[in-house]
Image (spheres, rainbow, N blue to C red):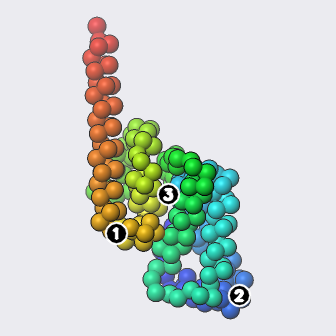
Amino acid sequence: MPPSDTRDDTLMRAVAKGDEKAFAELVARHQAWLHTLICAITQDKEQAKDLTQATLSRIHRAAPNYTPQGDFVAWAKRIAVNLSRNYLQQKRRVALVSLSELEGEILYDESDPMLLFLSKGLKEEVRGAIQTLPDEQRLTVIMRYFGDMSIQDIAWAMHVPEGTVKSRLYHSLRRVRTSLETLWIAESNSLKESKP
């Protein structure tokens, strides 16, 4: 996903003046990663298309009132996350992350234990563990590890303090680790029992 830069702010000012070419450039710069993030949250490819369009439409409508106080990308993510959360609340569905759709979007950091697990071939096990997380923890993990959002951006998008985001990430990683350890112990015991 492209980092936000002053170009986005310049484009938004042009969109506010009615420049549709500027909006088309914003769409070209940001549509793909917005769709990936929304798809991860909603787990519904068709609905993700609609929500991506709704996000872009909101960005377009907000252009006259847009003030470049912060990071355009974080602002766009907040819109996408809020629309996705509203969709899930309306449908009373549980959002399940599909890591297979996001593999190309994951930014690997060897110091990050979650991504180290993913990079070492444990994708299926990690996917299952993430799917068992409570909704808010799962959404926080999705935004942090697959949406490449900072703690501050997640807090802003979810309307919670940064400490809450850190706590959710900590508890999520502990639950994932516990789930994986339980799985590995069960597999280890199964292998021991199957030996002649």
**Amino acid type indicated by mark 3:** Glu
Quarter where residue 167 is shown: bottom left
Instruction: Tell me residue 166's x, y (percent).
Output: 30, 61
How many circles with numbers are drawn on the protein?
Answer: 3
- Which of pointers 2 and 1 indicates the residue nearer the eye? 1
Mark nearer the N terminus (2 vs 1): 2
Q: Tag 3, which secondary structure? A: helix
Q: Residue at x 66, y 67 (%)?
A: 54
Q: Residue furthest top?
A: 196
Residue 68 drawn above or below residue 130: below
Judged by depth in the image, the label closer to the viewer, 2 or 3, is 2
**Numbered tag placed on residue 105 in the rendering:** 3
Locate residue 79, reporting x and y percent. 55, 70
| Disc 1 residue type (three-letter) | Pro
How crowded is the residue under tag 3: few (<14 C-alpha within 10 Å), some, or many (20+)? some
State the CA–CA distance, disc 3 to disc 1: 26 Å
Instruction: Look at mark 2 in the image and give the residue it sits on.
Output: 19
| Percent position of residue 45, x then y | 64, 51
Q: Which residue is under mark 1?
A: 161
**Does label 3 or label 1 sit earlier along the sequence?**
3
Residue 63 screen position, x and y as percent: 62, 84
The secondary structure type at the circle numbered 2 is loop
Badge 2 amino acid? Asp
